[in-house]
Image: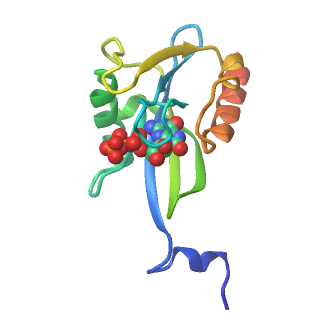
Amino acid sequence: MADDRSENTAGGIALMPVVAAALLDARGRVLLQRRPSGKQMADLWEFPGGKVEAGETPEAALVRELGEELAIRVVPAAMTPLAFASAALGAKHLLLLLYVIRDWTGTPQPLEASALAWVAPAAMAELAMPPADVPLVAALAHFLAIQG
Ligand SMILES: Nc1nc2c([nH]c(=O)n2[C@@H]2O[C@H](COP(=O)(O)OP(=O)(O)OP(=O)(O)O)[C@@H](O)[C@H]2O)c(=O)[nH]1
């Protein structure tokens, strides 16, 4: 008998784990980056991050991605898991893990993005973002609202 659990058995859907960061500044703004033209989901705004590679923990992947994309240094102890999204993405299935980060070393540089922007939570919903990000933006706005 087939049920939802059968989708994750051998030969089923390939999960693609992706880690992403909501970097927060002292004013509660969030750093978003714009995906470059020519990449999948070109020109959409997204949380910095990327795919977890084989043999990596999610936290190690996020340390690596934030170094590669923004030239900042973060440590796993500064990462607070906030929410995840689970969505079909082409032939794969995206598992997008969002962490909140308030402490890092260095000034973010757009090494891979076409632009960076510090965005107030209320303005995030106005930006074009990948569909999987929509519930994460809602969760983040809620988190920031209850933080005061
Ligand atoms: N970083 C990031 N990726 C996201 C977000 N939302 C979302 O759907 N994704 C998807 O997750 C995947 C991450 O891939 P990526 O291209 O950014 O990662 P990467 O740097 O490791 O990939 P590459 O080395 O193949 O270029 C993409 O399919 C991307 O569209 C988001 O907010 N941040």
Q: Which of the 4 image quadrants contains residue 74?
A: top left
Considering depth in this image, is 2 or 128 the residue closer to the camera? 128
Query: Could you tell me how many numbered marks the image carries?
Result: 0
Q: Is residue 40 above or below residue 114?
A: below
Q: Which residue extends farthest front?
A: 38
Specify the quarter for ligand 1. top left
Considering depth in this image, is 86 or 92 the residue closer to the camera? 92
Looking at the image, residue 73 sits to the left or right of residue 21; the answer is left
Q: Can residue 98 be seen by looking at this rendering?
A: no
Q: Which of the 4 image quadrants contains residue 113?
A: top left
How are the residues colored? rainbow
User: What residue lies at 32% left-to-right and 35% top-to-bottom?
Assistant: 65
Q: Which residue extends farthest top?
A: 27
Q: Is residue 92 above or below residue 143?
A: below
Residue 20 on image: x %, y %: 46, 37
Residue 31 on image: x %, y %: 50, 20
Considering depth in this image, is 46 or 21 the residue closer to the camera? 46
Looking at the image, residue 124 sits to the left or right of residue 31; the answer is right
User: What residue lies at 45% left-to-right and 43% top-to-bottom?
Assistant: 40
Q: Is residue 1 above or below residue 77?
A: below
| Image quadrant in which the N terminus is located | bottom right
Q: Is residue 59 above or below residue 8?
A: above
User: What residue lies at 52% left-to-right and 59% top-to-bottom?
Assistant: 90
Q: Can residue 93 be seen by looking at this rendering?
A: yes
Looking at the image, residue 135 sits to the left or right of residue 21; the answer is right
Residue 101 on image: x %, y %: 47, 26
| Image quadrant in which the C terminus is located | top right
User: What residue lies at 28% left-to-right and 57% top-to-bottom?
Assistant: 54
